[in-house]
Amino acid sequence: MKEKAMKVVFLIAACVSILAVALICIFLFANGIPAIKEIGLFDFLTGTAWKPGNHKFGILPMILGSIYVTAGALIVGVPIGILTAVFLAKYCPKKWYRILKGGVDLLAGIPSVVYGFFGLVVLVPMVRDTFGGNGNSILTASLLLGIMILPTIIETSEAAIQAVPDKYYEGALALGATHERSVYRTVVPAAKSGILAGIILGVGRAIGETMAVIMIAGNQARMPAGLLKGVRTLTANIVIEMGYAADLHREALIATGVVLFVFILIINLLFSILKNRSKGKSDKKGWVRRLVLRFSRKKEAAK
């Protein structure tokens, strides 16, 4: 009886989750599509001028701004995050693990506005004094977002690496590989799917971040002109102007949310395709890991 009741509870929870996603999609598309039709899809996506007072609603500067800032965050965050995850999973001494793990967890719990203050007080002057400009730029936003996505990438990647069976590592050592080679050529490739999942979550965090970006990116609704120039992202555009927007202006901002939603779906689709391709390639090259596992089983049988 209890099992049936729990099944019903789980079913209801799943249905509520699906319903929430469906309602969000219905709201976005029901309010955004009419605005896109009125403005024109081509003018809306490729227009370079965002001047609601003149009925110009081109979001290309914000699209490029989001792409540049997210790409910069990935360049900063992905290598550091993956290497940190490998260190925590395979290299970190036990006495340091709790301290470092607690620091990573603390990074995940810091509010976005605090990150924004850190960027405003530390990163903006640092970039201004080092590279010139006023400091409110794509580079500054990329550095800050790279720091913000670190906990997501580190925790997901570390969990994926620790989930790899120890037989992979032990078998590689038995075949004569060094500790570093066993980790980077056997364990990390085996955890590739989990690492990619962490990167996807990091992309979602970076492209959806608003408060911290507003505080340090400059927020100029114009075409990006360089790493040291200001930029406005899609999310920042919505938050800055939604408070006083009305009529077509408000609908255009909702349509911007539709574009952002579709953008994230495309990113997830591309990563899924990449994951499937890499899985196919790893299956073709999986004879090394199969050999390692076979050797490990023979070693256990001999014991």
Image (spheres, grey):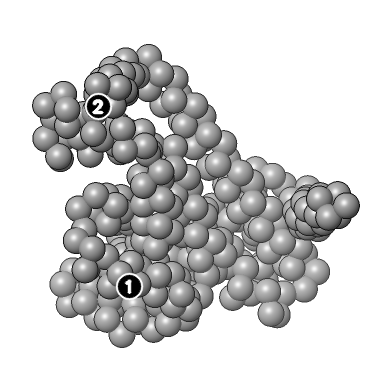
Report the mark closest to the observer, 2 or 1: 2
Residue 131, position as x, y percentages in the image: 18, 69
Residue placed under numbered mark 2 in the picture:
303
Identified at 32% across, 72% down, the residue is 103
Identified at 80% across, 69% down, the residue is 247
Q: Quadrant of residue 217?
A: bottom left
Q: Secondary structure at mark 2?
A: loop
Q: CA distance from mark 2 to mark 1?
A: 41 Å
Q: Amino acid at mark 1?
A: Gly
Residue 19, position as x, y percentages in the image: 82, 54
Position above or below: 221 against 191: below
Residue placed under numbered mark 1 in the picture:
103
Q: Quadrant of residue 282?
A: top left
Q: Quadrant of residue 160?
A: top left
Instruction: Determine crowd level at label 1: few under 14, some 14-19, many 20+ residues with C-alpha closer than 10 A.
Output: few
Which residue occupies the extreme front position in the image?
303
Identified at 30% across, 31% down, the residue is 168
Can the viewer see residue 122?
A: yes
Residue 81, position as x, y percentages in the image: 31, 55
Q: Secondary structure at mark 1?
A: helix
Position above or below: 141 against 153: below
Position above or below: 103 against 73: below
Instruction: Determine crowd level at label 2: few under 14, some 14-19, many 20+ residues with C-alpha closer than 10 A.
Output: few
Residue 42 vs residue 164, the one in the foreground: 164
Tag 2–tag 1 contact (CB < 8 Å): no
Q: Which mark is residue 39?
A: none
Residue 104 vs residue 187, the one in the foreground: 187
Q: Amino acid at mark 2?
A: Lys
Residue 124, position as x, y percentages in the image: 29, 77
Identified at 20% across, 34% down, the residue is 182
